[in-house]
Image (spheres, coloured by chain):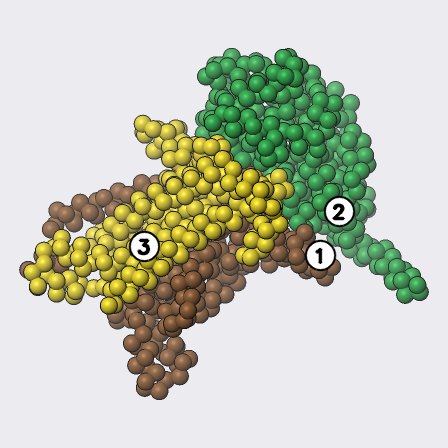
Chain colours: A brown, B yellow, C green
């Protein structure tokens, strides 16, 4: 088949490329993952189980899920709005705005956390007022939510912008010319076009929200059973020379993320046709 | 965000230079930016390859591989740090076989940042590559272009903006990365000490101004890099449209 | 005037009634890294003791981290009822920067408000292959020393000052800097915290000797199984005093002043002192100390007040930006 020869590579080259890619992924990704599970199961299943059902671990799990449940929906709204504005309209300073969206990625997470301490800490601008009104933000759950939201902000927008750029504005312009309102256009045209990119951004955002360490570490206060998220709990276990438990809880987070990713793969497989249809 | 700059402004210019541009800080920036750029470059090459393989070829276990690419997002950075250190330490699975020391050396930083940055490159290229479809390539081929020519002249330019974005994201993420790096770096001043660690050290000494001075310097630098790349892309898009 | 009086009265009534209503009380102990195991045991014992004496239920929350970072969190509003940190300087900073407790806090409890003490010892690999017996063995070529960064770690500051104190005693003050420089020349990895340094030495197999708190050294050997490491006690070391204090304003706000004070006083009781000794800290109580005399090797100890003019001065001279430690690090590169 001439068509296939001109748009694909010879079999041997394909094989070589796949092998290189897989080898790279195996060393760079699979081995660290294996190391986590090997560490977790180093002392057998019973030790593994007890590390996971321990009350502090469960409290950390609850907190992590709560934080993600607040931060992720917020970022869906922010991300949609930002990428919609950036890709469907022209305005001065657009490049600046795109760069601003990336900012949380380039700021060290430690600094992101620090920002909130500088603002809401006792020595910060709003600190004394907050203390007088007995509102706790830093070293309590609200601070953890804020820091997590900030750090995970770019994920949805970053996933959507290239996709929306690639798709262009013609569909929206057609809808508008047929008399659809802005909101209708968004819900009926834009959203279906980007839903898989959106889903993907949400998954990334969620995974990062659950795994964030640096920023949360600065604002958490590290109170056992109260303000420790799963990653912080892992650090604590690690610092207690409890390596097996640390890797056990770590494997939990890795497992949680793997489940999400499998779910996404299944979704794609189940609705494979509509993705292809929606994507093009 | 402006809090950082206002706090820094409280520092006189001399004090600012003394903290943010000290010899030690400069070598930390060099390591942070250098390692991040190197890791992002490695990821651009391999990330492009992985994205290409995932989009264009069929092979057994492709879904598993595709899911695995996101691991660095899913794995908390501290866990990644612990796992990578365990792997690359002289006693580890990989470290035991390598002729050079990786863990506790600047090379360890590159390893950690390569791990952290990979999905940024793969996931930004993948949708664009998939959206591109094969029809343009078929068109190019039917016009008599060879395979290599088609890839270089047609496919590469189309995904270049995405590749640049991926590089920028991986780079930016690498510059700020703290959790995974401190475990594997060795943290020796002037040698394997990253800039975010300097910030933390300033904080431990109650020196908020010093910390924000370094943070502001890093922020300005990475913002400049990001802006440059975005401008480059915008320029590239205009050129393509014309 | 009358309104102020009324308000004061109202506040007084509120302050008096609040603790009565609270059948269950919660206090937060903000502590440093190596005390996790210690306070787990102490908290359980004190909560039981408190219940027996007053009938009240007490929940003690713990927060652990690097001592400097923990102090900073309290300054920034982490509402600790009590702080139990690695060095007095960190609590001094809380007093100075936040005024949450008076500057004279260290005079309020016996023994400089330090219910236990410790010292800096060496942890070496089984059989002591490099023959390390005292501080001067650490500066020999080919000996790799693991310690954390004194800029970021409170524990590592004790290590540094212990080495400095030895050098001054042996070679005189002018040569001390030279000695410490040589020692840090032998440091291949500088972790940001003491626990990180221990992990690097114990788990990652880096270095020949770890400078550590005595209790950390014991704990590490204990956790790793007794046959991998040996503890070497040098001829002379520093008297490491980790202090405790009630954070007055936080406790008053929470209505927990009484229980917080009782908690810290409890640390000096024979029951708590026994827990302290069991967790490898040196107890203050003479009777308990006599009972555990075999566990702790006698050695000459010097104090930071006598030798370095107290923490504030030691901090400014050695660990501030541009201080002696920075000069040493700069000279090595």
Give the position of the C terminus of chain A as an image quadrant. Answer: bottom left
Residue B137 percent location from the top left of the image: 15, 62
Mark 2 closeness class: few <14, some 14–19, many ≥20 residues within 10 Å: some
For disc 1, the marked residue is A128
Q: Which residue is drawn at 74% across and 42% down?
A: C95
For disc 3, the marked residue is B164
The secondary element bearing badge 3 is classed as: helix
Give the position of the N terminus of chain A as an image quadrant. Answer: bottom left
Q: Label 2 is found on which chain of the structure? A: C
For disc 2, the marked residue is C100
Residue B17 percent location from the top left of the image: 54, 42
Residue in front for this viewpoint, A26 or A39: A26
Q: Which of marks 3 and 2 is in front?
A: 3
Mark 1 closeness class: few <14, some 14–19, many ≥20 residues within 10 Å: some
Q: Quadrant of residue A158?
A: bottom left
Q: Quadrant of residue C285?
A: top right
Residue A125 percent location from the top left of the image: 66, 57
Measure the alpha-carbon separation of dots 3 and 2.
51 Å
Q: Which residue is drawn at 31% across and 62% down?
A: B235
Residue B226 percent location from the top left of the image: 40, 54
CB contact under 8 Å: marks 3 and 1: no
Residue C87 seen in render: yes
Q: In this view, does A50 lie to the left or right of A24?
A: right
Q: Which residue is drawn at 75% across and 35% down?
A: C267
């Amino acid at each position: 088949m001439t068509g296939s020869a001109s748009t694909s590579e010879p079999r041997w080259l394909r094989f070589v490329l796949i092998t290189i890619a897989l080898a790279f992924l195996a060393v760079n990704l699979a081995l660290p993952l294996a190391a986590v599970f090997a560490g977790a199961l180093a002392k057998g299943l019973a030790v593994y189980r007890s590390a996971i059902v321990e009350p502090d671990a469960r409290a950390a799990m609850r907190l992590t899920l709560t934080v993600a449940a607040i931060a992720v929906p917020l970022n869906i709204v922010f991300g949609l709005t930002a990428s919609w504005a950036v890709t469907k309209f022209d305005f001065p300073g657009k490049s600046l705005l795109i760069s601003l969206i990336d900012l949380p990625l380039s700021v060290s997470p430690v600094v992101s956390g620090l920002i909130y301490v500088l603002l809401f800490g006792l020595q910060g601008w709003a600190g004394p007022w907050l203390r007088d009104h007995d509102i706790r933000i830093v070293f309590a759950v609200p601070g953890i939510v804020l820091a997590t939201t900030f750090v995970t902000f770019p994920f949805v927008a970053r996933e959507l912008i290239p996709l929306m750029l690639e798709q262009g504005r013609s569909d929206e312009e057609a809808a508008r010319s047929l008399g659809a309102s802005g909101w209708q256009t968004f819900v009926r045209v834009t959203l279906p076009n980007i839903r898989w990119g959106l889903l993907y951004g949400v998954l990334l955002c969620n995974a990062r929200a659950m795994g964030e360490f640096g920023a949360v570490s600065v604002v958490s206060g590290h109170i056992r059973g109260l303000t420790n998220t799963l990653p912080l709990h892992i650090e604590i276990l690690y610092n207690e020379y409890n390596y097996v438990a640390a890797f056990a809880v770590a494997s939990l987070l890795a497992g949680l993320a793997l489940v999400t990713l499998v779910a996404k793969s299944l979704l794609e497989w189940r609705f494979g046709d509509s993705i292809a249809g929606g994507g093009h | 965000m402006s809090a950082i700059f206002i706090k820094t402004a409280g520092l006189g210019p001399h004090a600012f230079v003394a903290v943010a541009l000290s010899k030690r800080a400069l070598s930390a920036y060099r390591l942070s930016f250098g390692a991040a750029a190197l890791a992002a470059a490695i990821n651009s090459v391999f990330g492009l390859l992985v994205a290409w393989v995932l989009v264009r070829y069929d092979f057994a276990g492709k879904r598993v591989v595709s899911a695995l690419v996101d691991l660095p997002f899913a794995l908390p950075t501290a866990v990644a740090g612990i796992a990578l250190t365990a792997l690359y330490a002289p006693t580890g699975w990989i470290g035991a076989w390598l002729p050079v020391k990786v863990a506790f050396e600047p090379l360890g930083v590159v390893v950690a940042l390569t791990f952290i940055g990979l999905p940024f490159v793969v996931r930004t290229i993948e949708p664009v590559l998939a959206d591109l479809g094969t029809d343009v390539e078929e068109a190019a081929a039917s016009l008599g272009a060879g395979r290599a020519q088609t890839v270089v002249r047609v496919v590469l330019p189309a995904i270049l903006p995405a590749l640049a974005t991926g590089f920028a994201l991986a780079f930016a993420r690498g510059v700020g990365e703290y959790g995974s790096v401190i475990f594997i770096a060795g943290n020796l001043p002037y040698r394997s000490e990253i800039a975010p660690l300097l910030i933390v050290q300033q904080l431990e000494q109650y020196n908020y101004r010093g910390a924000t001075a370094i943070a502001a310097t890093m922020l300005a630098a990475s913002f400049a890099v990001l802006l440059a790349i975005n401008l480059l892309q915008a320029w590239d898009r205009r050129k393509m449209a014309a | 005037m009358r309104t102020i009086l009324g308000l004061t009265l109202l506040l007084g009534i509120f302050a008096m009634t609040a603790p009565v209503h609270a059948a269950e009380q919660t206090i937060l102990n903000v502590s440093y890294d190596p005390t996790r195991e210690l306070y787990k045991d102490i908290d359980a014992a004190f909560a039981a003791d408190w219940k027996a004496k007053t009938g009240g239920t007490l929940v003690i929350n713990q927060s652990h981290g690097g001592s400097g970072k923990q102090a900073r969190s309290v300054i920034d509003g982490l509402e600790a009822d009590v702080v139990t940190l690695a060095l007095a300087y960190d609590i001094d900073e809380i007093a100075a920067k936040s005024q949450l407790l008076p500057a004279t806090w260290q005079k309020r409890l016996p023994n400089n408000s330090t219910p236990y003490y410790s010292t800096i010892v060496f942890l070496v690999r089984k059989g002591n292959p490099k023959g390390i017996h005292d501080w001067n063995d650490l500066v020999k070529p080919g000996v790799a020393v693991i310690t954390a960064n004194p800029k970021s770690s409170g524990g590592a500051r004790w290590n540094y000052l212990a080495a400095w104190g030895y050098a001054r005693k042996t070679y005189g003050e002018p040569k001390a800097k030279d000695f410490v420089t040589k020692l840090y020349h032998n440091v291949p990895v500088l972790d940001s915290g003491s626990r990180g340094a221990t992990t690097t030495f114990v788990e990652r197999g880096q270095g020949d000797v770890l400078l550590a708190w005595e209790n950390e050294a014991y704990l590490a050997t204990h956790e790793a199984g007794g046959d991998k490491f040996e503890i070497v006690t040098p001829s002379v070391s520093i008297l490491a005093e980790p202090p405790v204090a009630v954070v007055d304003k936080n406790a008053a706000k929470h209505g927990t002043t009484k229980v917080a004070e009782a908690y810290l006083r409890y640390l000096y009781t024979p029951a708590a002192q026994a827990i302290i000794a069991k967790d490898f800290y040196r107890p203050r109580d003479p009777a308990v100390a006599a009972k555990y005399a075999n566990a702790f090797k006698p050695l000459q100890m010097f104090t930071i007040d006598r030798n370095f003019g107290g923490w504030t001065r030691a901090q400014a001279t050695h660990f501030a930006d541009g201080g002696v430690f920075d000069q040493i690090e700069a000279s090595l590169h």
